[in-house]
Amino acid sequence: MNQEFIFCPRCGAVTAPGVCTNCGFKIEKEETVNETVNNEFTDSANETSSVVQTETVNEMPQDNTVEKKKPVGLIIGIVAGVLAVLFLILILGVVGVVAFAPMIIKTAYTPSTPPSPVVTATLPNTTDDDDDDDEEDNNKDTDKDADSDVDDDDDKDTDTDDTDDDIVDEFAGYSETIEPLYGGTSQFDYDKFVEDFINNANEYWDEPADDTNDFYLNGSYSSYMQSPYSQEFIERDGFETPYYQYVINSYVENDNYEVERRIIRFEGQINGIFANAYCAYYNLYSDDVDYTAVNEALRNQAVTSLYNYVTTHTSSSAFNYTLYCDSVITFNNDEIFSVAYNSTAYVDNNTQTFYIHGVNVDVKNGEVMDNTKIFNLDDDFSRFFISRSNTQNSFVEAINYSDIKDVTKVLNDDDSLIVLFTPLGLEIGCDYRYKYSYGWVTVTINDFDKYLSGNYKFDSDFGKGYDIFKYEKENGITPDGYDADEDDDYYDL
């Protein structure tokens, strides 16, 4: 009787059934499932193929040879499936980015506790100057007051000459020294606004704010200067530091006047631009004081960015301009009503500008204060301002590398000067342009009496409960003799 030999399924050696004499593998009887496939187009109709879940061994042919098949199809299928899944994930990622890019781009991040008042956006270099190559498209400087550089800060922009298919970036101009950044209303013409904007709007309304139309109070609006909590009241002695870190609602009911919050909604096509605006402002009412002129000024400040941009730009290639402008009452009492306007604008999905501006009202006399007349803004004050900024904000290139007289000039420009009364005292600074950047810088002054010009009479006791110098001494906050290079990043929130 001839000994029966088989091939070991592990090593392929010829061995007797039982245990492989070559590798020691225990050979058990393996069931095979034969599936006969009739092939109508070949002569091999008697061939069979076996299907097993792991490795398949065909029945031994007469010549005692074994065909050992590997699961090539299974491996190919697994690889193809993995590649398909990865491709699907990639496609979904691209679709997600495209779908949510506007939302991401249009959400300005505000830290809960920013160091102090400096924000700067750096613009792309549009010239071949080698020494300006270090300026990048980043947000530099830091603070609660984010500002943008608006079209005609000092009438040096030439945007109105560029028309048709060119969407002009009015911030791309190079400024060798610090220059004013337009954020006020000196170029605003309400009659022209009515004629060109309101009369040609697809939608326009100016109504009292309520739970249904106030996006800023009822939504989660956040920007460089303003957090979603900016409209939530904080007790005036409840600030954790003597620094005014971002705009905060500090409105207290007053028996001498009433306050009404209003919302302006505009949508229309002007000069080939599809413009949308959503702006908030306040009105004052009293039986004893006429606030008509004050309320007009408060309204105009809310829409000045919309007006300024659209009237200085034309294009035959349609694009979108969107403005969000919120207002927050930073302080009020029997004598003062102070409002911060926080504006952020977009061209399509790109940030076009962001800035802060303050409107201060002498409520007893029913007039808007001239911000440049509240303080004595001379060269000595500019030096003090820079010194305080170096301690409070760290190094700010625009004010440290500019001539002191240029800093004084910007501080005396009502369109760029920032003045806000707050429970911490007085917040003062400027919106500016410098090189290819634009932004703002402010400092907090708790005890500000000696800097007042005397043009306006009011009780200046507020803010005295806070002491910046004591706070800085206790916490070891000093300017540390900053000597930074021009390409340094100072703060980066």
Image (tube, rainbow, N blue to C red):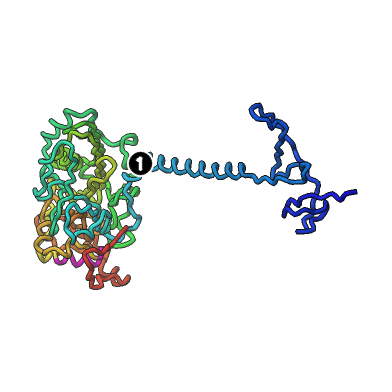
Left or right side of 74 for 397: left
Nearer to me, 218 or 33:
33
In percent of width and height, residue 467 lies at 26, 66
457 or 182: nearer the viewer: 182
Left or right, 343 with reference to 62: left
Count numbered badges in the picture: 1
Instruction: Residue at 34% x, 34% y: name it.
Output: 212
Q: Residue furthest right?
A: 1
Q: Where is residue 454, by image quadrant? A: bottom left
Res. 61 in view? yes
Q: Residue lying furthest top in this view?
A: 40
Query: Where is residue 289 drawn, in percent x and y?
Result: 14, 42
Q: Which residue is mark 1?
A: 219
Residue at (11, 64) in percent of width and height: 404
Which of 323/333 is in front? 323
Q: Is residue 253 magenta?
A: no
- Give the quadrant of the C terminus: bottom left
Amino acid type at mark 1:
Gly
Q: Is residue 307 above or below residue 134?
A: above
Q: In x, y percent, where is residue 179?
A: 13, 55
Residue 282 place in picture, x, y as percent: 22, 41
Task: Name the image quarter holding residue 292.
Answer: top left
Bounds of the magenta segment: 383-394
Q: Quadrant of residue 235?
A: bottom left
- Report if residue 386 lies within the magenta region: yes
Majority secondary structure of magenta residues: helix
Residue 254 visible in image: no
Q: Residues within 10 Å of mark 1 (few under 14, many from 20)?
A: few
Q: Name the element at disc 1.
A: loop
Toward the viewer: 159 or 473? 159
